[in-house]
Image (cartoon, helix red, strand yellow):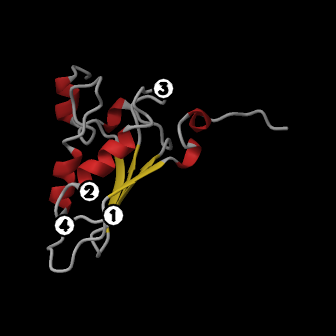
Amino acid sequence: MDSHKELSDFLPGGADFKAMAGSPVEAGVALASEADLVTALKTVYDPEIPVDIFELGLIYEYDIDQDGSVEVKMSLTAPGCPVAGEMPKMVAEAVAGVKGFGEVTVELVWDPPWTKERMTEEAKFALDMW
C-alpha cells in the first residue's frame, strides 16, 4: 500500500479541485475581451494579502474560447492557505460576473509551486518584498 500523500490530498476536492460559474453567453451579446478578464481577476484578493491575485502571480494560465467560456489555472501563495477551498470559486464568480463571458472553470494547480518571483514589480513594492 502506497502511503505517500501529496499536498492536494488534504485540500477540498483533492488534486483536481475545480470551481465553475456562469452560463453560456446569450445570442447577440458581444464577447468580453482579455482586458476584461484581467480586470475581473484583479478584483479578487487573498483575504490575508492586500494585493490582487493577478499581481501576486497566482494566475498561471487562462484561455477565452470563441463561445466566451473561460478556463483559468491558478495557484495559491501557500498550500495551507485558509481560503484554498474558496479562492477558485471566488475567481470563477468574478469572471462569470462580466457581461460577455460564459461558463468559467477555474482549476487550482500546484505545479510549478508559486514563488515570489511570479509577482509583478508593483506587488513586490506594495508588500516590500524585494
Residue 57 in the image: x percent, y percent?
A: 31, 40
Residue at mark 3 to residue at mark 1: CA–CA distance: 28 Å
Q: Which mark is residue 103?
A: 1
Residue at mark 3 to residue at mark 2: CA–CA distance: 26 Å
Residue at mark 4 to residue at mark 1: CA–CA distance: 10 Å
Q: Which amino acid, by three-letter code, is at mark 4?
A: Gly
- Give the mark nearer the N terminus: 3 vs 4: 3
Q: Which residue is mark 2?
A: 96
Front position in the image: 26 or 41? 26
Residue 83 in the image: x percent, y percent?
A: 39, 31
Quarter of the image with the N terminus is top right
Sort mark 1 into few (<14), some (14-19) or many (20+) by Cα contacts within 10 Å: many
Quarter of the image with the C terminus is top left
Answer whether labels 3 and 1 touch (C-beta < 8 Å). Answer: no
Q: Which residue is mark 3?
A: 80
**Residue at the (30%, 31%) spot, across then down:** 46
User: Callout 2: helix, strand or loop?
Assistant: helix
Q: Which amino acid, by three-letter code, is at mark 3?
A: Gly
Q: Which residue is mark 4?
A: 100
User: Callout 4: helix, strand or loop?
Assistant: loop
